[in-house]
Amino acid sequence: MNVKGLSNTEISNQFNAFSSTTAYFGYLRLIQPLDRDPPNGYRNWQILISASDEDGVGTTFKSVKAVTITLQDINDNAPFLVNEMPVKWPENRNPGQVVQLQSNDFDDVQNGPPYTYGIDSEASPDIKTKFSIDNDYLFANVMFDREEQKENYIPIRISDSGVPRQSAVSILHLIIGDVNDNAMTEGSSRIFIYNYKGEAPDTDIGRVFVDDLDDWDLEDKSFKWKNDISHDQFRLNPSTGMITMLQHTGEGEYVLEFTVDEESTYIPYHSVDADVTVVIRELPEEAVDKSGSIRFINITKEEFIYVPRDMQSPEALSLKDSLQHSLSKLFNTSVSNVDVFTVLQNENNTLDVRYSDHGSPYYSPEKLNGMVAQNQQRLENELDLQMLMVNIDECLIERLKCESSCTNELHKSSVPYMIYSNTTSFVGVNAFVQAQCVCEALLLNHCLNGGTPRYGENDVCDCIDDFTGPHCELVSVAFYGSGYAFYEPISACDNTKISLEITPQVDQGLIMYLGPLNYNPLLPLSDFLALELEKCYPVLTVDYGSGGIRIKHQHIRMVADRSYQLDIILQRTSIEMTVDNCRLSTCMSLGAPQGPNEFLNVNAPLQLGGSPVDLAQLGRQLNWTHVPTQQGFFGCVRNLTINEHTYNLGMPSVFRNIDSGCQQSVAVAFSFGIDRNFIVAIIALLLIILLAVVVQKKQKNGWHEKDIDDIRETIINYEDEGGGERDTDYDLNVLRTQPFYEEKLYKDPHALQSGRGRDPNDIPDIGDFLGDKKENCDRDSGGLTVDDVRHYAYEGDGNSDGSLSSLASGTDDGDLNFDYLSNFGPRFRKLADMYGEEPSDTDSNVDDEQGWRI
């Protein structure tokens, strides 16, 4: 006879049905203890048992019977309070009965009531003084003043009547109700508003604030505009004091003035003034799309924006303001360039904050999140807050939102939301991410790097030279062993396909790293992927968070100056790496993920060429079985695609020591096996020589600065700014005379003869000297024989102002020689074509197959 259990999986895990080999009956055996009580237990358990003869072989008869097991109750659950919370007790009331305590117990009634109540022995002396319990009633022993303490948390120990007795402590939350027994005084408040794309509709932005110790007294107050002068862009509710910003209100700072009236049973009628400063800032869509995000823990939205009343100076900062200042220092930008525009409260006492920063244009999310993650500990210390997650990712915890593939989708709304905290109110952008259970590649709907959409064709771009990606991406980047570059992260997918091309120059180094940037004890996820070059062979390490697998490729040896194609496929149950599209078993390297996890869950930026992270220390903290090398990659990486998304490799968000586009000149030097330091020395020497040539050319041509007049004897330097050279046909050569110390083109035979007979010791006659000079001037064939008048503006020696007319007369075509621009490389080719010689037909942006793409 064959006996089988036919129940569902949950019940099958509790029981085991089997047949006896010595008798014609079966046994039903309990594998695990059964629970009778809610929320996970059942009073009755039913199991379907199938019995068949002949051990189920051949022609058999089978019967199915239901077996029901009824569990007896034991007292294994303690009672707990079920009163509606919070309980309210008004201030200024005499001591008395507060509330009747109510409890429940998951056990049967024989192990439940009646219950016994008492203030827990571990309660504070203050609680024991103020409250007492008689039977099942809570009593207040004193009169309370809400202005002294607004709420109390009372620990109450409850015991049942079962055997053995079970007891536990429940907390009763009691709020002291407010009575309007304090007069108000003048107040000032500030409201900051982010208007997303300037599209906010009519929006409530906050109430008029007056300084008042009471806070449940709104019905005793009335509000109006001061002197009945209203504002065109704002509306006031006279009963509640709520201010509404009207649609199309422009950005800027507005000062609103109000008068508030109050009267109650305890205080007479009186009026005070109140002012509200409203600051509105429009936020473009780019700021939200490129925002970074942080999930804080153990903080409320009101606490985050609140400025304490005793710190109402202009220098006082809320936690939101402090975060803004810390981020500006981290990114080395002005505080005004940092926007903290989203503050959303979650159910589990976490707070989601989104921010942006910009120079021109806005910084990418990879830069913002990457730099914050690297400096997380320092920021937490400055803010005295804990960060649960940097870069909010609803897919990070495996199977929390989706059973398979998971992608984050950013939702944005033009309808703002308000956070109100008396003196400070904040109106932010409603932006948040939601998990979508699909594997979607990042799709671009625009052209990058100066490309333009092709007219009449969808998703096609016309790109400038060297940008060869489908959306004008610069698809190559080089590293020199000490650099790295950050790019956008990937999504968790059932099937992730990674493809890239590498041209190594050394035999080892870290090519790619995708994993955490720091150790976060609140969320110690250990997932990572590392692609390395080890002794000329690629090595892939993958850890889904439950153990790492290291795959070594041993078939194709990667030598310097050759390009190799690498393809990686990540699946739930297998990991594959292929080199040069070789599908032979010797070319393919396979492995299986370790442990129960099935996805690579990482929200940090993708890193190429190396990593700034101390991987050895991080590996120890996360208990990695395999730790990637810290040595950076030396070579070129091209054409990286992940799930059909082409990466813009030449334009990383964060980088160090990279060469965008893999410049050919450096690659050629590498191909000869020259040492890197020698290459750097050669480049430096070439730059010095180039600088010397340029300086010499500038000094020779003088096109970059004004000519210094070559005037001798008694003529003072000046700038010709009179009637204009062209107007007077003036020629500066008339002022240029042969200096007496230069070699003459003619010789006076009489002077030569007289010079031979002169004694060297004779003292020369000054009259003869001046006469000789006069004769030289008379014989000068270039001199003018007729005196005339020249008009010019004398401005003294050393004048620094130049004449615009000298730009034309002081230079010629030979001075403007820009041929050297063609030697500056591909980035200056357009400039060289405009000002230099015509480009050669043989120019190309791609070298032979042994070179690098430039």
Image: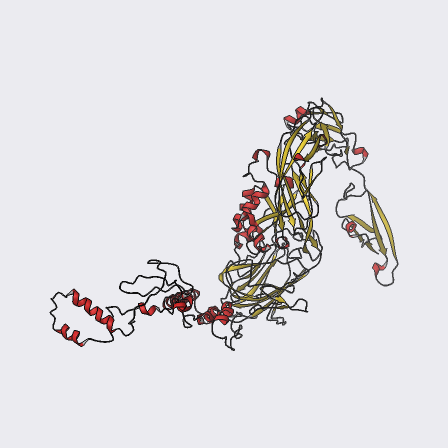
In the rendered view, would you say 840 is above or below 242?
below
The part of the image, by quadrant, that contains residue 725 is bottom left
In the image, taking residue 410 as reference, residue 801 lies left or right, namely left
Q: Position of residue 65 (x, y in %)?
A: 87, 51
Task: Pick the residue in front: 4 or 569.
Answer: 569
In the image, taking residue 603 as reference, residue 849 lies left or right, namely left
Q: Position of residue 96 (x, y in %)?
A: 73, 23
In the image, taking residue 271 as reference, residue 326 lies left or right, namely left
- The answer to whether residue 278 is seen in the rendering is yes
Task: Pick the residue in front: 554 or 99.
Answer: 99
Give the position of the N terminus as an image quadrant: bottom right
- The answer to whether residue 519 is seen in the rendering is no
> Who's the residue at 28% across and 69% down the image?
737
Task: Pick the residue in front: 608 or 161.
Answer: 608
Task: Pick the residue in front: 233 or 221.
Answer: 233
The part of the image, by quadrant, that contains residue 86 is top right
> Who's the residue at 68% across and 69% down the image?
457
Q: Position of residue 173 (x, y in %)?
A: 70, 32
- Residue farthest along the top direction in this orientation: 94
In the rendered view, would you say 112 is above or below 717?
above
